[in-house]
Image (cartoon, helix red, strand yellow):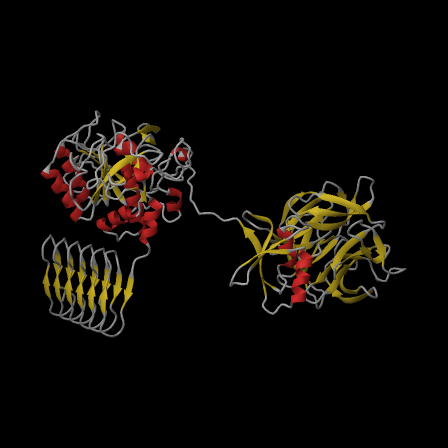
Amino acid sequence: MAVFYATDSATDSVYQIDSQTGTATLVGPLGFTSDFSGLSSDSSELSDEEPLFASNIFDPLNSESLATLELKTGAATVIGPQFASDIHAIAHQDGILYGFSVTQGLGTIDPATGAFTPSFDVPTFPVSMEGADVDESTNTLFALGEDNALYTIDVSTGEASLVGSTGVEFNSRVGLAYNPEDEQLYALGDDSEAGDNLYQIDKATGAATLIGNTGLVEADSLEFVEVVTITGDHAPNQLIVKLQPDAPSTEIESLKDSLNASVIGTTQTLGIQLWEIDGLSVEEAIATHGDDPRFEILEANFLVSTTQTFPNDPRFGELYGLNNTGQTGGTPDADIDSPEAWDIQTGSSDVVIGVIDTGVDYNHPDLNDNMWTNPGEIPDNGIDDDGNGFVDDFFGYDFFNNDGDPFDDNSHGTHVSGTIAAEGNNGIGVTGASWDGQIMALKFLGAGGSGFTFDAIRAVEYATMMGANLTSNSWGGGGFSAGLRDAIAAAGEAEQLFIAAAGNNSSDNDSNPFYPATYDLDNVISVAATDDDDQLAGFSNFGANSVDLGAAGVDVLSTIPGGGYGFKSGTSMATPHVSGVASLLLSQDPGLSAQEVKDLILASVDPIPALEGITVTGGRLNAFNALSELGPPVELIGTEGDDVLTGTNRGDLISGLGGDDIIQGLAGSDEISGGADNDLISAGDGNDTVEGNDGQDDILGGDGDDLLNGHSGEDRILGESGDDTISGGRSSDIVDGGEGSDSVSGDR
């Protein structure tokens, strides 16, 4: 921070002055009386622990004394009497503090005692000097006289050489300061009824240019200071140092002596050392030596740690499943590393999570801003506005009561929703694994917590139809249902994950299947419950082949209807942790397929002994690991020649440029551009966007809902499976939508 400091005799206070506008901001009171004070520092760079020197501070015995001013507060500490009256200006040159006395002229001041010693037997100046400072670029000492003119001062002879008049009629009180940032002089003084003004002074002519009014009335000093502050914890007596390669060894030893430093550590190949210093602070060392050209690096030895983003929700500390510090008596770090994950991604309102459960309290203050709403529906008008077959389905739908109000009359669904996406960092309650996801309320369980399979099928179908990215399913039982399995399989074909609770019967799902978690479908993730010690919950089901992973499910705090919060246990509570992490992954990369999200979650677990051999992964969910595994999309760019470009099983960005290219997108939602010439493009699985561009292209959409555009040239386009949108572009194209409900346009 670089600012001007000034003292004002009317208020006996210290101010900071804005060099651009002249505006004054109070730092604090001196604590003593001042009059016609001067200010000076022995360097333009000071730490906030180093003082400014001030003259004409009246001590308790009413002696005019030298004092130091604390930069943070403005408080003055008296050093000692000057033994000279009316020292209106002081300035440092070549390490010496000079004073300008009205009666005795030029002299030196002992910074240890405050004593003033005249340099000459008689005053040598033609007028008394009211303000002074050194131009550091030329080491020239300038002073402003009571005649409102600028002078240069030769301290060896006491001679004052006139530069020129400022053209301003100051009322004797004036401060002068050099600003090394623009290498200009500035003056502050009382020259108008409106109070004191800040001026820029031309060093060649003395002419003054008005900057602005400070609002002060008796400012009598001015000094520029760049305050060197170090933000962040650091070792109190250590510096990280790298010296210039050509620095002579004698000068290196001189630097060490000046800092009273010793080398306590050295890198092997980088030439960087760790110095321990004594006698001054790290801030002072950097302030006084930071510009020394012999140092290539001079910096604090900062304390660093893993970065973690913590929300301000007051009950976040109780959510051991997200961040386990041992707060419940459990094992620290038996959690999903949410703070570390939130450094990467906190969630997106573009991700929709269908909560198929007992409903949701959509008015809860921790959920209301994260509720999905149907953009095509007007609530409570009794009309199916969007024609989807459901009336007033604004927040979702109640399949238990067959109406458009999925409000939770049990509490289970609201609790699940809070773990997924209670609004994070909003200063109230708790936070979900995702701070910002959209909850689609799909109620098929009644107040007693039970419902029927057909209503579950309808709920799954609705989520698929309305475009949810995934559903969270903390329910089960009732045996195998081909209809429910088909609904979940259809959701999978629409790239929708189905995350399900493994059940609370303490049984092996391999031998005693628990549906829907045990349906052998690619889009299903089955979740067991663990406790705060990373042990399998006593009630939790398991299965080496049928239960994928674990997550916290014992005494989990979350939202409940009516704006409250409560604790619940069950694999029902573990499941939404996984749903929240899936939401984070889709927030980070919306192009991920359902299979990719599942693979990332399962591949990134924390292995724990309690789940080894009884779950597919042998581990507990970890959000940070999953996001870290993700990485950026793969981008493949061809040449102007004939290329063979093969993507990955994720969402790739592939551009063929020129030449007759062969491009394979494989799985994932890819963006493919064939470029010029005749290309063969196979988009593969996933919802792909393909631009054939110029040339006679062969385009195969593969599975998924693809957007295929042939553009110029006589193209052959086959949409294959999925609901494709195909545009042949210009020229005579052969277009076949393939399976699915396709939109096909030949264009012209």
Residue 164 in percent (x, y) is at: 75, 66
Residue 526 in percent (x, y) is at: 22, 40
In the drawing, does residue 658 fall left or right of residue 210? left
Residue 147 in percent (x, y) is at: 79, 60
Between residues 77 and 603, which one lies in front from this camera angle? 603
Residue 748 seen from this side:
yes
For the C terminus, give its image quadrant. bottom left
Total numbered labels: 0
Residue 455 in percent (x, y) is at: 14, 34
Residue 193 seen from this side:
no
- Vertical arrangement, residue 370 with respect to residue 724, above or below: above
In the drawing, does residue 78 fall left or right of residue 246? right
- Vertical arrangement, residue 467 with respect to residue 167, above or below: above
Between residues 33 and 191, which one lies in front from this camera angle? 33
Residue placed furthest toward the top: 448
In the drawing, does residue 373 fall left or right of residue 710? right
- Vertical arrangement, residue 608 with respect to residue 39, above or below: above
- Classify residue 464 by image quadrant: top left
